[in-house]
Image: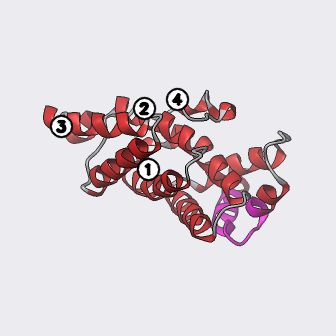
Amino acid sequence: MYSDDDANSDASSACSERSYSSRNGGMAPHYLRQTEDVALNHCASANWSERKEGLLGLQNLLKSQRMLSRVELKRLCEIFTRMFADPHSKVFSMFLETLVDFIVLHRDDLQDWLFVLLTQLLKKMGADLLGSVQAKVQKALDVTRESFPYEQQFNILMRFIVDQTPFITGQGRISQADPAPWPLCLERATWRRGASR
């Protein structure tokens, strides 16, 4: 298996418990489940070309508005947590594109995975990446900011800022400390705290 980010291995399994059947009245037909299983198996492969193929299949499923089951969501959150450290640039680039589709479709199911998602994106913003890849990280970060409650994001940001672990670069801290992308998040969280007093 390719390299894993140990710092988030525990948090990666904390995906939401909401299921496809609870929202849609039942499971998708068995042949559709098989397609999703194949895509997930490819995404978890040690071979970079199979991971890329799995991401392509997953993109097609997500763009067709196919909802994943609770078990599939949990597994995909674990796979995606590892993919933040994928060593192959083509796979990582396609992962970022797929991540945006995943967030848009399953935002209501990813509350428990938000800490991993947001902190990994912030760390990538501080990494030395190609401009095209950096733009995809920024897009994923923008979609994340628009998709989740501001107060929850604010709390995660505060934990991230005070975290003293050495793997967060100074550049990473600067990227998340820049107030330009976060005004609504900070304003809403501050307003709620003041109103509750």
Q: Amino acid at mark 3?
A: Ala
Looking at the rendered structure, which numbered label has been put on residue 107? 1
Residue 35 relative to residue 88: left or right = left
Q: Which residue is mark 2?
A: 75
Q: Name the residue at 79% across, 43% down.
A: 167
Q: Earlier in the sequence, mark 4 or mark 3?
A: 4
Q: Is residue 98 visible?
A: yes
Gap between marks 2 and 4 measured at Cα: 8 Å
Q: Amino acid at mark 1?
A: Arg
Residue 188 percent location from the top left of the image:
64, 62
Circle 2: element type: helix
In this view of the protein, which residue sits in the foreground, 147 or 174? 174
Gap between marks 2 and 1 measured at Cα: 16 Å
Q: Earlier in the sequence, mark 1 or mark 3?
A: 3
Residue 4 percent location from the top left of the image:
61, 34
Cβ–Cβ under 8 Å for marks 2 and 1: no
Circle 1: element type: helix
Q: Which residue is mark 3?
A: 28
Q: Name the residue at 67% across, 54% down.
A: 124
Q: Amino acid at mark 2?
A: Arg
Cβ–Cβ under 8 Å for marks 4 and 3: no
